[in-house]
Image (tube, rainbow, N blue to C red):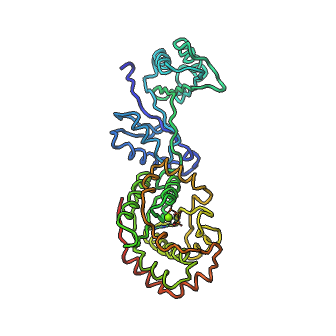
Amino acid sequence: MENNERMLILVRYGEVFLKGLNRPYFLRALVKNVRQAVKEEGAEVWLHDGRIFVAGFTDLEQCLERVCRVFGVHSACPAVEMEKEDFGAVCRRAAALMEGLTGSFKVSARRSDKRYFLDSPHINAEVGGAVLEANPALQVDLHHPDHVLNVEIRDKAYLYVRVAPGVGGMPSGTGGKAALLLSGGIDSPVAGWTMAKRGVSLVAVHFHSFPYTSDRAKEKVLELARLVGATCGGMKVCVVPFTHIQTEIHEKCPEDYTTLIMRRYMMRIAERIARQEGARALITGESLGQVASQTMEALAVTDAVVEMPVFRPLIGCDKSEIMDTARRIGTLATSELPYEDCCTVFTPRHPATRPRRERAEEGEARLESEALIQEALAGVETVLV
Ligand code: ATP
Ligand code: MG
C-alpha cells in the first residue's frame, strides 16, 4: 500500500466534551466501552490528541455499527490514515476518496501539527484543487456543501468524508445505578434504555405471578433485559414472586384501588432491592394518562411509598413514539410476543383515576404488609444476563 495507508475509525464524542474537569473520567469510560464493543472485531482502540481511534478490524461496516451504538459516541468516521510528508500523495488520495460523488463539496482542513509546512487555508486550497481536477462532476460550495472532505494533519494525515451518526448519550457507568421495574411490555424496556443512554447502569426488578403468569412470560422479560443490557454492560434481573401479594390485595382491598395498591407494593419492594444493589433511583415505563394508574393523582399516590427518586423518562411520550423507539432499539418484536402480565391478571373493571392516598392506606392496613414484603424478598431469584 502507498504511504503505509490503512483504514481506521475516528470517533467523535458529544457531551463528554463539555464535562470540564471531569472530562478525563468520562473519556476513559468511553474508551473502555468502545473497546469492549469492538472486542470481537479484533480491533484496538486508543485515545490520542483528544480523539478516539479504532483500527485493526476485519470488517469496517460491522465495526462501525458497533462503535455507533456505544453511548457517548456522537459520530464515527471511517478515515484513511497515511503518511503526511508527501503532500502530493495526500492530494491524490483525497481526490480518489471523492471519486463517484456528485454535487458540491468543501475541504475542511485541521492542522494539529503546527510545524507542518502548509497551514489550513493552504491545505484547503491545494486539496480542493486536486479534487476538482480529478472529479469534474463536483463543484465547490463553502457554505452549504453536499460533502465535506476532512483533512486532519496530526502525527499522520487523516482523510474522511463519511460521518456515521452515533447514538449519543453519556458513557455507561458514569451516571450511577438505578433499578428498572421491568415488565414484559413495550414501555419499560424503552424507559430502561433511555436512562442507560444517559450513562446509568441498570439492575432490573421483575414481578412474577406464577402460575397466573407463565415461565414463558418470565423468559420474555429475561430476553428484554438481555437486549437492553447489551447496550450498557449487562444487567442483573431480580425476579420477585408476587402472587401472594396480589391475591391478598384482590381479596382484601377495594376493587377500584387494587392496581394502584399493587403498584405501591412493587415500588416498595423495588426500593428495597435497589438499596441492596447500590442503586439510587427507580425507573418505570409510565407515561402520563396512558392508563388509570398513570394519571397525575395515581402517580403521586404511587410515589408516596418510596423515598428514592422515581425516573419516568417516557412520561411525556405518546405510545406511538415509544413504539418507534422500541423498534429502533430492537425490543419491540420481543415485547409484542403474547404474554400475561401480573397487572392484567387482576385488572379491576373501574380503576380509580383520581385516587386518594388515605384510601390506599386504608386498604393496605388490612394486609400484613411487612410480612408480605419480606416473604417476596426472601423468594427473589436473580439472573445475570
Ligand atoms: P409496560 O409496557 O412497560 O408493561 P404498561 O404501559 O403496560 O408498561 P403498566 O402495566 O401500568 O404499564 O405498568 C407501569 C410500569 O410499572 C411499567 O412500565 C413497569 O415499569 C412497571 N411494571 C408493571 N408491571 C411490572 C412487572 N410485572 N414487573 C416489573 N415492573 C412492572
Ligand atoms: Mg405492563
Q: Is residue 179 at all visible to an observer of this figure?
A: no
Residue at the spot x=45%, y=62% of the render? 184
Residue at the spot x=56%, y=28% of the render? 110
Q: In the picture shown, does residue 266 fall above or below 251? A: above
Q: List x then y, in percent, for residue 298.
A: 61, 72
**Count of labels in the image:** 0
Residue 365, by quadrant, is bottom right
Q: In the picture shown, does residue 213 fall above or below 63? A: below
Q: Is residue 36 at all visible to an observer of this figure?
A: yes
From the viewer's side, name the closer residue of 154 and 366. 366
Q: Is residue 210 left or right of residue 50?
A: left
Q: Is residue 129 left or right of residue 221?
A: right
Q: List x then y, in percent, for residue 50.
A: 51, 39
Residue 243, by quadrant, is bottom left
Report the quarter where the N terminus lies: top left
Q: List x then y, in percent, for residue 273.
A: 44, 71
